[in-house]
Image: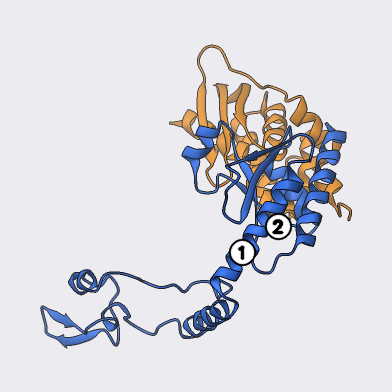
Amino acid sequence: MSFNNLDTLYRQVIMDHYKNPRNRGKLEGDHITVELNNPTCGDRIDLQLKVNDGIVEDAKFEGEGCSISMSSASMMTQVIIGKNVEDAVKISKMFSDMMLGEEVDTADYKLEDLGDIQALQGVSKFPARIKCATLAWKAMEQGVEKEDE
Amino acid sequence: MCGPTGVGVLYGKQHLLENMEPVEFGGEMIDFVNLYDSTWKELPWKFEGGTPIIAGAIGLGAAIDFLNEVGMEAIEEHEQELAKYALEQMEQIDGITIYGPRERAGLVTFNLDDVHPHDSATALDSLGIAVRAGHHCAQPLMKELQVAATARASFYLYNSKQDVDLLVEGLRKTKEYFGDVF
């Protein structure tokens, strides 16, 4: 009885983000808030974004969920802070393609540019967990859309 | 029920079913058709418009025959024995929370401390053990229990005590695995 392939999913860096989430908390001042759930599994994210002149100046999240959903949220905030909205959405699309096991468009960003996110690549081999990983990204996309309105 | 998915039974009081209008229209459910109104055949045809799910219905019949042959009481007794055994074994795991009373249906709902049930479920899955993790279509209960989600092992006629032993061993390993990485 041994855990086949479990280490390809639960990489050390994922566990580190789960245990020590980056940008967890509440933003002060003006910001956009998006709350999203995965109703079937109970994961919940409350994402706050501060967007000025099309730039994501700051991002924080709160919520509860499994190691995959919470680490993905932590990594997502790290990579989008400082990016413009267009690039944040581009990276979100790359991430979504990565999860679906599709070819990732690396015209603007290489996978190496995405930092710790690469560690989530293994999730694509666990179909039941893909929605955990994409929750925070969906929240981010909804948030920046709100900013457009 | 061990039958095919996508097929089921509509069970109801005859006089109420007779008063109900059909929601699906199609062949075999029509009595008279006029330009502006129609009448329906009697029960059960009124509710069986169009080509039925033939293979599914035959499969469901076979499943019912099978369950009757095994016997509902025998199935319940088997489930109860496994649930009782599972409860006794699982309670001995350090750092496990088990939900619900001792008198229970053929299942055990639980959480491993500091391990999210989805992570437990994935770990158990990789050992070939299928459990359900999440809200179990019971969000108010999760709120009442003050947990985000739980994991649940259910037993049926094809499970054995050996399966329970494997589950318990798997839970210990899962605890160890996530204990190490955290």
Which residue corresponds to the image point at 46% horizontal and 85% vertical from the top-left?
Answer: B54
Q: How is the image coloured?
A: by chain
Disc 2 to disc 1, C-alpha distance: 22 Å
Chain A visual colour: orange
Q: Which amino acid does label 2 sit on?
A: Ala
Give the quarter of the image for residue B76: bottom right
Which residue corresponds to the image point at 60% horizontal and 70% vertical from the top-left?
Answer: B74
Looking at the image, residue B118 sits to the left or right of residue A63; the answer is: right
Give the quarter of the image for residue B98: top right
Q: Position of residue A66 (x, y in %)?
A: 68, 38
Residue A48 or residue A41, whichever sits in front: A41
Residue B66 or residue B82, whichever sits in front: B82
Instruction: Give the total number of marks visible in the rendering.
Output: 2
Q: Position of residue A77 (x, y in %)?
A: 67, 28
Q: In this view, does B86 lie above or below A80?
A: below
Q: Residue pushed farthest top?
A: A29
The local secondary structure at tag 2 comes to: loop
Residue B50 or residue B40, whichever sits in front: B40
Tell me the blue chain.
B
| Quarter of the image with the C terminus of chain B in it | top right
N-terminal-most mark, 2 or 1: 1
The local secondary structure at tag 1 comes to: helix
Identify the mark at residue B130; answer none if there is no mark: 2
Which residue corresponds to the image point at 53% horizontal and 37% vertical from the top-left?
Answer: B142
Q: Which amino acid does label 1 sit on?
A: Glu
Which residue corresponds to the image point at 72% horizontal and 23% vertical from the top-left?
Answer: A22
Give the quarter of the image for residue B145: top right
Identify the mark at residue B77; answer none if there is no mark: 1
